[in-house]
């Protein structure tokens, strides 16, 4: 029997009992749609979480801090490894590390023309900046030949406000967004207080040559300069500081930055040993480490913690998200699976009924010369077609449901954005990638085939004589 | 009006076995040969004998009628001869092929190639058109649509149904349905046609038409026809009539001796 003939006959037989076939398809449709929508929700949820995490900071960057080392629950487990040049060499040797840079951090009061504000200034290996995903909105990155040239985060400008203008216009003025480009090619004057003797001050002039883009929220409130320049400022800031003393945090510190909290806790921990303070003061404030991909980030971040570093990355949060989304997917997929299983029983039932009705017909075909293979092919094809139709329309329904879910969630998110949370466009929480669409249809057909096996076997075993006996 | 017409056996000589030397007198190979076929059914604890040793030989081109009352076992014999049912004992050969050597799986293809069926209740597939019903054996054979439809159209035209090709069986009369059924039996030119009460549901006028058509088609193709009926008038169309009573053929030996060789 030719394949197209099997298909034509099976299809025609299917539509002889239109209502029954449609109802059976409906079962498959609902089953497929629920599985697809469930899986798409799991996928979308995960992706949107990943994307919003990436807004806060790159998933390819590991940050390493000195201070206390914490376990998963956040309990201090001992002192973290120190960060100096030997450490750098050690870290560079880890496979999967693309680039790294130590940092020094200083903070102080800054002026920009008439405006005043507080700044966090980070010194970094300028050569490593492109590798460390510093991307620009305006201007350029500082170069090593220059002195005191810096690049500012996208939001740094919002640290500055004109006190006189504020007094005139009221406090609300403070919250107005300012144009980041306003900082470009401007002179910033940073005044640093010595932390041992707060009365001692020194001012440094800096020239802003570039503005970072807004992709990385973690960096948007900081100003970056060369290690050498910032080290000089820091040396002044820490002159005469005893290690036992808490470092000073200026009022300009922004609570938005999660690592600040960690740093504050670790700095406040009393477990400082009796190490010489000079030796300790030369240690880096942190190390930024760029990995080759998210998987490497997770691996390296965990391995570093294992080795006693106080390491942290945005990707660490992924694991929890992944576990949650896997659980959600398992639950939702399970519901869909049960639905589809019931649908499969429906197909089997329909096919058995159909065989009862067509007993005589099957008998005739066998007498006329239909082989076992022909009979099996016809009934399996019918069952598979039910699966196919159910699968295709189920997929259609899934696309519809997915669009509705995304629309509703987008409305909620936009609502949230108006309240001042989050940023960027609303991310879809239900995603149906092509592989999922294909998988759904193939799976539905497979379900049909499997459901058709038993009925097809019954049809094969049917005795043609009994079937065509004159009644 | 029983007609026991001995036939000349002329058409039988057309059937030649490949590999036999030409021009030499050859023994005619029977188209259908049954040897002492026995069939017993088990009904609960009781064993009911249906066929009690049927021995029959049909030469190529021969038209034989089995005449018998209902329940005498003639349909069972037909089923067994066609390989639809296995006998309890005995042997059947179709064109020299022993049926008991053919597996259940190969039987379908064998039937398709060697045997055409005509039933009392037509046994057409209600969802298929006249043309599709007629070419059904070719569909199972895997013949492409264009070729089989051309053949089917020609055959149905010959059966007088040229204008009913796209009709469904339930839109046609009994006689028309049986014509489709005849076309289906003939479509792949089998050597053997089994007709089980082909006119049992038809009025006498249509009965005559159908039988004439059947006989004409069979003769034209040199096919061998086994006609099973309870009606002596129908049986009278055959070259030879054997009567069946309680699962036995009356004087089959005598018939064979009288008519052949």
Image: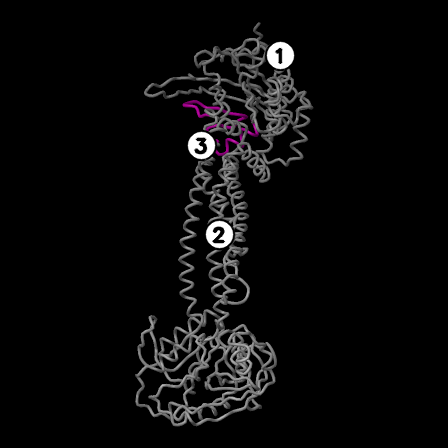
Q: Chain of mark 1?
A: B
Q: Chain of mark 3?
A: A
Residue A153 percent location from the top left of the image: 53, 79
* Residue at position x 66%, y 31% in the image: B149
Name the image quarter holding the N terminus of chain A. top right
* Residue at position x 68%, y 22% in the image: B158
Would you identify the image quadrant in which residue A88 lies? bottom left
Please give the range of residues in magenta.
B85-114
Query: Distance of mark 3 from mark 2, alpha carbons?
Result: 40 Å
Callout 3 crowding tier (Cα within 10 Å): few <14, some 14–19, many ≥20: few
Callout 1 crowding tier (Cα within 10 Å): few <14, some 14–19, many ≥20: some
Would you identify the image quadrant in which residue A16 lies? top right
With respect to residue B44, does A11 lie above or below?
Answer: below
> Left or right: where does residue A116 sit relative to residue A240?
right
In terms of sequence position, does the residue under pointer 3 or pointer 2 come before the other?
A: 2
Q: Nearer the viewer, mark 1 or mark 2?
A: 2
Residue B42 percent location from the top left of the image: 36, 21
Closer-to-camera residue (A357/B246): A357
- Residue denoted by label 3: A461
- Residue denoted by label 2: A37
On whether residue A216 falls in the magenta region, the answer is no
Closer-to-camera residue (B11/B195): B195
Asked which secondary structure carries label 3, the reply is helix
- Residue denoted by label 1: B208
Q: Chain of mark 2?
A: A
Residue A457 percent location from the top left of the image: 45, 36
Query: Distance of mark 1 from mark 3, alpha carbons?
Result: 38 Å
Asked which secondary structure carries label 1, the reply is helix
> Left or right: where does residue B13 sit relative to residue A125?
right
Residue A123 percent location from the top left of the image: 49, 85
């Amino acid at each position: 029997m030719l394949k197209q003939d099997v298909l034509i006959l099976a299809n025609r037989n299917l539509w002889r009992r239109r209502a029954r076939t449609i109802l059976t398809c409906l079962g498959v449709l609902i089953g497929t749609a629920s599985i697809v929508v469930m899986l798409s929700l799991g996928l979308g949820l995960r992706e949107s979480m990943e994307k919003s995490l990436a807004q806060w900071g790159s998933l390819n960057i590991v940050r390493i801090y000195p201070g206390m080392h914490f376990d998963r629950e956040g309990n201090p487990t001992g002192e973290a490894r120190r960060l100096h040049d030997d450490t750098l060499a050690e870290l560079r040797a880890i496979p999967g590390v693309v680039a790294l840079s130590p940092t020094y951090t200083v903070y102080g009061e800054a002026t920009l023309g008439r405006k005043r504000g507080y700044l966090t200034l980070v010194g970094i290996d300028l050569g490593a900046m492109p590798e460390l995903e510093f991307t620009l909105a305006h201007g350029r990155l500082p170069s090593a030949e220059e002195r005191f040239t810096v690049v500012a985060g996208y939001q740094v400008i919002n640290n500055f406000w004109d006190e006189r203008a504020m007094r005139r216009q009221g406090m609300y003025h403070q919250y107005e967004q300012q144009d980041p480009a306003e900082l470009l090619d401007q002179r910033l004057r940073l005044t640093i207080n010595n932390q041992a003797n707060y009365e001692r001050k020194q001012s440094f002039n800096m020239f802003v040559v570039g503005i970072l883009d807004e992709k990385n929220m973690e960096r948007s409130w900081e100003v970056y300069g060369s290690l050498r320049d910032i080290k000089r400022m820091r040396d002044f800031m820490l002159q005469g500081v005893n290690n036992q003393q808490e470092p000073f945090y200026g009022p300009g510190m922004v609570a938005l930055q999660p690592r600040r909290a960690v740093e504050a806790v670790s700095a406040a921990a009393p477990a400082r040993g009796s190490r010489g303070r000079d030796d300790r003061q030369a240690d880096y404030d942190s190390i930024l480490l760029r990995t080759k991909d998210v998987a490497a980030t997770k691996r390296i971040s965990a391995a570093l913690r294992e080795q006693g570093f106080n390491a942290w990355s945005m990707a660490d949060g992924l694991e929890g998200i992944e576990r949650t989304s896997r659980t959600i997917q398992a639950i939702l997929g399970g519901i869909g699976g049960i639905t589809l299983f019931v649908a499969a029983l429906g197909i089997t039932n329909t096919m058995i009924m159909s065989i009862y009705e067509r007993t005589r017909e099957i008998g005739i075909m066998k007498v006329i010369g239909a082989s076992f293979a022909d009979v099996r092919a016809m009934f399996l094809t019918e069952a598979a077609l039910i699966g196919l139709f159910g699968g295709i329309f189920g997929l259609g329904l899934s696309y519809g449901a997915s669009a509705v879910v995304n629309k509703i969630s987008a409305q909620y998110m936009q609502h949230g954005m108006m309240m001042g949370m989050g940023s960027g466009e609303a991310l879809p929480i239900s995603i149906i990638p092509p592989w999922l669409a294909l998988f759904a249809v193939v799976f539905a057909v497979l379900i049909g085939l499997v459901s058709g096996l038993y009925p097809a076997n019954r049809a094969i075993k049917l005795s043609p004589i009994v079937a065509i006996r004159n009644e | 009006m029983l007609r026991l017409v001995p036939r000349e056996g002329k058409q039988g000589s057309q059937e030649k076995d490949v590999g036999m030397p030409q021009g030499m007198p050859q023994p005619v190979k029977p188209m259908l040969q049954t040897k002492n076929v026995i069939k017993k059914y088990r009904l609960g604890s009781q064993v009911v004998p249906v066929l009690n040793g049927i021995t029959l030989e049909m030469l190529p081109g021969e038209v034989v009628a089995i005449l018998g009352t209902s329940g005498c076992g003639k349909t069972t014999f037909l089923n067994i001869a066609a390989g639809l049912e296995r006998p309890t004992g005995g042997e059947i050969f179709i064109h020299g092929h022993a049926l008991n050597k053919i597996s259940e799986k190969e039987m379908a293809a064998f039937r398709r190639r060697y045997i055409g069926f005509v039933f009392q209740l037509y046994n057409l597939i209600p969802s298929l058109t006249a043309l599709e019903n007629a070419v059904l054996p070719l569909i199972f054979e895997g013949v492409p649509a264009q070729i089989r439809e051309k053949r089917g159209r020609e055959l149905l035209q010959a059966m007088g149904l040229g204008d009913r090709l796209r009709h469904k069986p339930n839109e046609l009369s009994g006689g028309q349905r049986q014509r489709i059924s005849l076309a289906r039996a003939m479509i792949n030119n089998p050597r053997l046609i089994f007709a089980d009460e082909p006119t049992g549901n038809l009025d006498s006028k249509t009965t005559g038409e159908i039988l004439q058509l059947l006989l004409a088609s069979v003769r034209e193709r040199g096919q061998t026809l086994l006609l099973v009926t309870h009606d002596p008038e129908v049986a009278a169309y055959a070259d030879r009539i054997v009567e069946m009573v309680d699962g036995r053929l009356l004087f089959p030996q005598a018939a064979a001796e009288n008519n052949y060789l």
